[in-house]
Amino acid sequence: MVKNARCLIEKTMIILAVILLLGSICSFHKGQATEIDKLLGKNVRMIYSIEPGTPFKLVITDDPADEVDSKGEVKFITSDNIELELPFFLEKGKSADYEVSSSENVKRVIIELKEGSIFIDSGDKLKIESSPSEPQVSPKMILLPQGSFSADMFINMEGKITTGKFYLSDHLYRFDTAGDGQAQSMIVDRKTGKVWLLNINEKAYAISSTEDFGVHFINPFEAHFWMMTKYKITDRGKEKVGELLCEKKELMEGELLVQTAWISEKYRFPLKLINYDKNKQHMLLELRNIKEEKINPEIFEVPRDFRLIK
């Protein structure tokens, strides 16, 4: 299950939809973990260890007594020091289950809670390695985009082609796609972190945030920005995408190539992304026919006749 999770996340990240996102103090003791541990607060984490090769099940449940939905991520670290991060976003009382087989050789589990309150059922095999603590802040910084242009968006997901339109105006961007009779759009404000998901056919929209992991699943650009803070980055010089000079970067997870990105020096935005599954390309996204122009501000506004879905 752990092996296939990253592939599953990548395969769903370009499906645009108005989605319902799934949805520190801690009771613990050193040594053997209690059957149920509790973790609450903002930006806190619990670390467990286990003998590599031991199968186990982990269940994380949102605290039904807490009105705040819980979001965070579970990180599995193998004996080969390969890391796999799985986000969770849990509504009140909902659970996320993780079953790890002996072949995964997991040696450590780190649960990072961004906000909310959760119960952790770690069974009797995981041991608490350290007390709850604040996770280290990544020193990597993502600059805001700049400039303005329109482009055609091209996506090849294992042979399935999707096309659409893309618009950038400094910290704002939008992309539109249509498939299976559904026209959908996403507007992102990278300065405020606000996200609008538009269902054009239904004249409806939802509001989310760039911090919500559900957005990373369906927006390849936000997934890229998130991965830039999580994986090792190697500079591969400069290459052009179309007529624009880009910095080429490779994102690595251990020995595995996760993504290659071409980031425009002029616009500070990725113009081309390739995602990999086990070092083999399975998704390509490219912005083509880039036209530098001033974008109508209405492009980044939700139409007045659209209804809000909460």
Image (cartoon, rainbow, N blue to C red):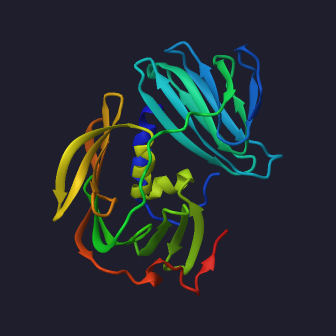
Residue at position x 59%, y 69% in the image: 206
The quarter holding residue 88 reads top right
| Of the pair 22 and 118, the residue shown nearer to us | 118
State the residue at coordinates (54%, 50%): 213
Rendered location of residue 26, percent (x, y):
76, 30
Residue, x 45% and y 82% (percent of image)? 297
The residue lying at 75 percent from left, 46 percent from top is 93
Q: Choose top left, top right, bottom left or bottom right for residue 285.
A: bottom left
x and y, in percent, of residue 124 in the image: 69, 17
Farthest-out residue, right: 65
Say above or below: 265 vs 61: below
Where residue 179 sits, quadrant-wise, is bottom left
Furthest residue toward bottom? 305
The quarter of the image holding the C terminus is: bottom right
- Residue 103 located left or right of residue 56: left
Left or right of 38, for residue 152: left
- Asked whether residue 2 is in view, the answer is yes
Percent position of residue 117, x then y: 74, 41
For the residue pair 182 and 185, the one nearer the viewer reads as 185
- Camera-side residue of 61 and 227: 227
